[in-house]
Image: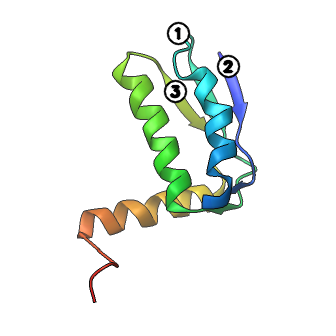
């Protein structure tokens, strides 16, 4: 199993760095564990990238887990899921 430590800041300005960490492991056949205990700041862009990585690996039959998720990551994921389930759209006046 490959273990990748996520950086503390998953804000939009750091998504490129996260992409560079994840991309080499997209096609790994062995399971990937994302260690998320150090995550302190999260934007939707960071969550979207993590989701795409996990989704694409799952679509190819590859296992990915998020381990030791920090409260910041858990709360951000819950908030985004709630907004999506409610159909919240901040772009309308």
- The answer to which quarter of the image holds residue 22 is top right
Q: Quadrant of the C terminus?
A: bottom left
Q: Nearer the viewer, residue 19 or 59?
A: 19
Tag 1, which secondary structure?
loop
Which label sits on residue 92?
none
N-term mark: 3 or 1? 1
> CB atoms at circles 2 and 3 under 8 Å apart?
no
Which label sits on residue 29?
1
Tag 3, which secondary structure?
strand
What kind of colouring is applied to the model shown? rainbow
Q: Position of residue 88 (x, y in %)?
A: 29, 74
Label 2 crowd bin: few (<14), some (14–19), many (20+), radius 10 Å: few
Residue 2 located left or right of residue 85: right
N-term mark: 2 or 3? 2
Q: Is residue 68 visible?
A: no
Q: Position of residue 75 (x, y in %)?
A: 54, 63
**Residue at 64% of width from left, 46% of height from top?**
16
- The answer to which quarter of the image holds residue 52 is top left
Q: CA distance from mark 2 to mark 3?
A: 10 Å
Q: Position of residue 21 (x, y in %)?
A: 68, 33
């Amino acid at each position: 199993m490959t273990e990748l430590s996520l950086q503390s800041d998953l804000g939009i300005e750091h998504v490129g760095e996260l992409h560079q960490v994840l991309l080499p492991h997209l096609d790994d056949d062995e399971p990937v564990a994302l260690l998320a205990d150090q995550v302190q700041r999260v934007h939707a862009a960071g969550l979207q990238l993590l989701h795409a990585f996990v989704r694409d690996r799952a679509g190819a039959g590859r296992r990915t887990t998020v381990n030791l998720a920090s409260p910041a990551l858990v709360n951000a994921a819950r908030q985004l899921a709630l907004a999506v389930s409610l159909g919240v759209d901040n772009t309308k006046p």
